[in-house]
């Protein structure tokens, strides 16, 4: 007979519910490793939560009690969040009722265990949210998490806003509803999409991305839905589209706000019943694809201007995630600066460069209009140049810095000549880009080719210089 020694962790788990059977069971399966306290009266739990540092995780029975159980539970969850904004809260729920899961996600539930459950379900959830059996978990707002998603992508999060967003992603990953991710350019919409896919039951099926702004309507239609032989000149043999290729998986429709109007109806159809026809095809095909869409446009504005179908918006918007801009989670800047530095250094097989307090201060004070993408580029530049003065010079004076005593960028760091050169360079660049865009009738792909920059870089520059088509400025759209 082998004897297993179990070390009890110091972690305190609270369990709330009205079903004594469930509470007893939970206590029994966790009591060898954790301190578990059960509560049948929400008031007692509230009192406990108000004691500093006494609870590391809450397990809560969601549909407990009578028919009003869910509503009560929602109110209770909101109350708990008010006291303990970052406490991991795992719910026991009878079914994946979409509405409930989404409401719970909005209120910041961390995870759901479906009833009936077994010991390993609880162990798994507790381990996940307490971290490695609870032994390495250091609760606190400054905890950095790095979740590997694929060879190139890691989901890094260290702020409270991002942990709330992570919890929402985990919950929504359990459903199949479409998700709309809003956020400025470079805020991590694609990373969040990949995270949802990885956390979902579809994680071992395909994940495909389509950039809806990158090509004209007919090309995008064949890309998404495929075509039959002879559908158009050059269609020598039939080809499946991404929706077919991605059956069972997740499709990421990036820049959805730019999807040509003609295609929006066809997309709406797939979202409604999973059916579509290939270009030139006579048969209706049916697929099971989860759609996640993202945009950095103001989609409500696009609807008001009749550029985006309202019905499509409501279909896509099963759940909306808003990626906060970096300036609203500036506590993450040092974390990301080190992370991007480690990443670029590892890629080149070198040691990461050091950040002096002056450089770090300049990084923290910069408003980051291009968000994490801009930060990553600056860090790469620092790695290549190795010249922190040059980087400090590159960073514009803070526009979003708080009151002056909170410390804006000291403009003495930014030599006058450098700034002058930078602004002249910026002017010349924006004129060249505007000319290329006008010259190609605002075909961004063609303009990017002409300018020999990537499509994404062009989108970023358009935003950076706030460029708009000349025609649109003169003649308001009447669509
Ligand atoms: N939470 C994160 N953890 C790690 N890396 C991140 C995170 N958020 C963003 N990044 C990195 O920052 C860059 C921009 O992220 P991403 O492409 O997801 O942004 P986006 O919102 O899709 O931008 P765009 O609107 O320009 O397409 C990428 O290199 C990505 O790997
Ligand atoms: Mg993107």
Image: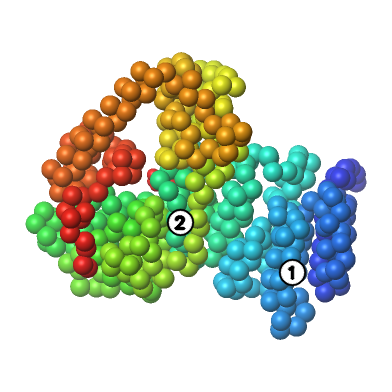
Disc 2/disc 1 C-alpha distance (Å)? 28 Å
Residue 392 location in percent, x, y?
47, 23
Residue 119 location in percent, x, y?
77, 60
Q: Residues within 10 Å of mark 2 (few under 14, many from 20)?
A: many
Residue 158 as seen in the image, left or right of residue 218: right
Residue identified by numbered label 1: 76
Q: Residue at x 33, y 66 (%)?
A: 303
Note whether ligand 1 is within 8 Å of mark 2: yes
Element carrying mark 2: strand
Residue 362 location in percent, x, y?
52, 27
Residue situated furthest bottom in the rendering: 67
Which corner quadrant of the image does residue 456 belong to?
top left
Q: Residues within 10 Å of mark 1 (few under 14, many from 20)?
A: some
Residue 219 as seen in the image, left or right of residue 461: left
Numbered mark located on residue 181 in the image: 2
Numbered mark located on residue 302 in the image: none
Can you say whether 274 is above or below 440 in the image?
Answer: below
Note whether ligand 1 is within 8 Å of mark 1: no
Residue 301 location in percent, x, y?
35, 62
Residue situated furthest front in the rendering: 404
Element carrying mark 1: helix
């Amino acid at each position: 007979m082998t004897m297993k020694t179990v070390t009890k962790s110091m972690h305190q788990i609270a369990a709330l519910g009205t079903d004594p059977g469930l509470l007893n069971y939970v206590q029994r399966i966790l009591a060898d490793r954790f301190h578990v306290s059960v509560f049948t009266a929400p008031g007692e739990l509230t009192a406990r939560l108000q004691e500093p540092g006494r609870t590391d995780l809450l397990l809560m029975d969601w549909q407990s009690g009578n028919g009003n159980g869910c509503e009560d539970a929602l109110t209770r969850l909101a109350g708990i969040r008010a006291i303990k904004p970052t406490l991991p809260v795992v719910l026991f729920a009878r079914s994946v009722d979409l509405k409930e899961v989404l409401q719970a996600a909005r209120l910041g539930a961390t995870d759901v265990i479906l009833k009936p459950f077994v010991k390993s379900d609880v162990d798994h959830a507790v381990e996940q949210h307490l971290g490695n059996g609870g032994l390495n978990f250091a609760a606190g707002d400054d905890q950095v998490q790095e979740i590997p998603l694929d060879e190139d992508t890691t989901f890094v999060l260290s702020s409270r806003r991002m942990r709330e967003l992570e919890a929402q992603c985990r919950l929504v990953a359990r459903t199949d509803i479409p998700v709309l991710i809003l956020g400025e350019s470079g805020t991590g919409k694609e990373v969040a999409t990949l995270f949802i896919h990885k956390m979902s039951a579809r994680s071992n099926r395909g994940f495909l991305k389509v950039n809806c702004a990158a090509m004209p309507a007919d090309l995008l239609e064949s890309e998404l839905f495929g075509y039959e032989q002879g559908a158009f000149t050059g269609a020598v043999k039939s080809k499946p589209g991404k929706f077919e290729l991605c059956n069972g998986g997740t499709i990421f429709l990036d820049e959805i706000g730019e999807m040509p109007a003609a295609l929006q109806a066809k997309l709406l159809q797939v979202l409604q019943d999973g059916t579509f026809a290939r270009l030139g095809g006579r048969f209706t095909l049916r697929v099971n694809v989860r759609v996640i869409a993202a945009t950095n446009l103001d989609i409500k504005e696009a609807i008001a201007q009749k550029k985006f179908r309202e019905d499509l918006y409501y279909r896509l918007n099963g759940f909306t995630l808003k990626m906060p801009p970096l300036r609203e989670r500036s506590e993450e800047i040092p974390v990301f600066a080190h992370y991007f530095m480690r990443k670029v250094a590892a890629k080149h097989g070198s040691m990461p460069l050091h950040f002096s307090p002056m450089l770090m201060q300049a990084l923290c004070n910069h408003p980051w209009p291009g968000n994490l993408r801009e930060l990553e580029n600056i860090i790469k530049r620092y790695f290549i140049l190795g010249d922190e003065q040059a980087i400090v010079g590159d960073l514009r004076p803070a526009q979003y810095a708080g009151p002056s005593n909170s410390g804006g960028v000291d403009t003495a760091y930014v030599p006058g000549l450098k700034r002058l050169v930078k602004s002249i360079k910026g002017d010349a660049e924006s004129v060249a880009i505007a000319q290329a865009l006008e010259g190609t009738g605002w075909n961004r792909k063609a303009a990017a080719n002409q300018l020999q920059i990537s499509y994404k870089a062009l989108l970023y520059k358009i935003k950076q210089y706030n460029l708009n088509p000349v025609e649109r400025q003169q003649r308001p759209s009447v669509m």
